[in-house]
Image: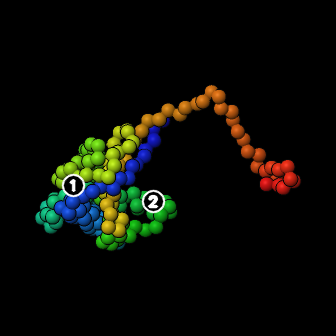
Amino acid sequence: MNIQLAHKIEPKPNDAQKGYFAKACGISRFTWNWGLAEWKRQYEDGLKPAGLELKKQFNAIKKELYPWVFEVLRDANSQPFSNLQTAFNQFFKNSSKYPQFKKKSVNDSFYIANDKFKVEKKKIYISKLGWVRMRECLNISGKILSATISRIADKWFVSISLKMKITPGVCENQEAVGVDLGVKKLATISNGEVL
């Protein structure tokens, strides 16, 4: 059986690395907001917007209009379109509210695909940035799927998502235990007190 887990670790970035993280978060936020504004505009024009199509439209203009998005890894301006599509899918299923524009320093984060980073002991290597120290090692083994760098107050965190294969074990010496939901008294102790 496969399960997906995430391990959140606090990195120890230097000032330049903190600047890179903040820039990547800003680009991710800008891309989300651009995509959401375009989604609304196209919907009002009678079109059926989609995350993948918006991503293609953004890619066609970003080199000319937004060249600064190339200063960080591509996932920062690519993943928000998938996230936007997911948010609208959930909205259309009535399982979440209408997607909102993102504000600076509120839930700042950016996504990193598994081919853009690697982890070794207490370090993580991120494309276009280099090695960043972490406070602890990745203590879960499995196939690394992705990472998300996020900021909470003035601290940064990296959440590494992994897929693990587990085999449910069965102990031969354990008995089954059941709970009778019709029980009115749990126990009566020797002094007559009912629990």
Q: Which residue is the extreme one toward the left? A: 64
Residue at left 29%, top 47%?
122
Relative vertical location of residue 120 with respect to residue 43 in this rendering, above or below: above
Q: Toward which corner of the image does residue 194 lie, by quadrant?
A: bottom right
Task: Pick whichever, 79 or 175, lies toward us.
Answer: 175
Residue where numbered disc 2 is placed:
90
The amino acid marked with disc number 1 is: Arg
The disc placed on residue 6 is none
Tell me if residue 61 can be seen: no
Say which quadrant the C terminus sits in. bottom right
The disc placed on residue 74 is 1
Task: Pick whichever, 57 or 64, lies toward us.
Answer: 64
Task: Pick whichever, 22 or 26, lies toward us.
Answer: 22
Task: Pick whichever, 53 or 121, lies toward us.
Answer: 121
In space, the residues marked 1 and 2 are separated at their CA atoms by 25 Å
Relative vertical location of residue 133 with respect to residue 101 in this rendering, above or below: above
Q: List x then y, in percent, for residue 97.
A: 46, 67
Q: Local crowd at mark 2 within 10 Å, few (<14), some, or many (≥20)?
A: some
Q: Toward which corner of the image does residue 36 lie, by quadrant?
A: bottom left
Question: What kind of element bears circle 2?
Answer: helix
Relative vertical location of residue 133 with respect to residue 120 in this rendering, above or below: below
Going by the image, does 139 lie left or right of 188?
left
Residue at left 32%, top 67%?
154
Q: Check contact, mark 1 vs mark 2: CB within 8 A.
A: no
Q: List x then y, in percent, for residue 52.
A: 30, 55
The amino acid marked with disc number 2 is: Gln
Question: What kind of element bears circle 1?
Answer: loop
Quick one: label 1 or label 2, which is nearer the N terminus? 1
Residue at left 70%, top 39%?
177
Q: List x then y, in percent, for residue 98.
A: 43, 68
Q: Local crowd at mark 1 within 10 Å, few (<14), some, or many (≥20)?
A: some
Q: Nearer the viewer, mark 1 or mark 2?
A: 1
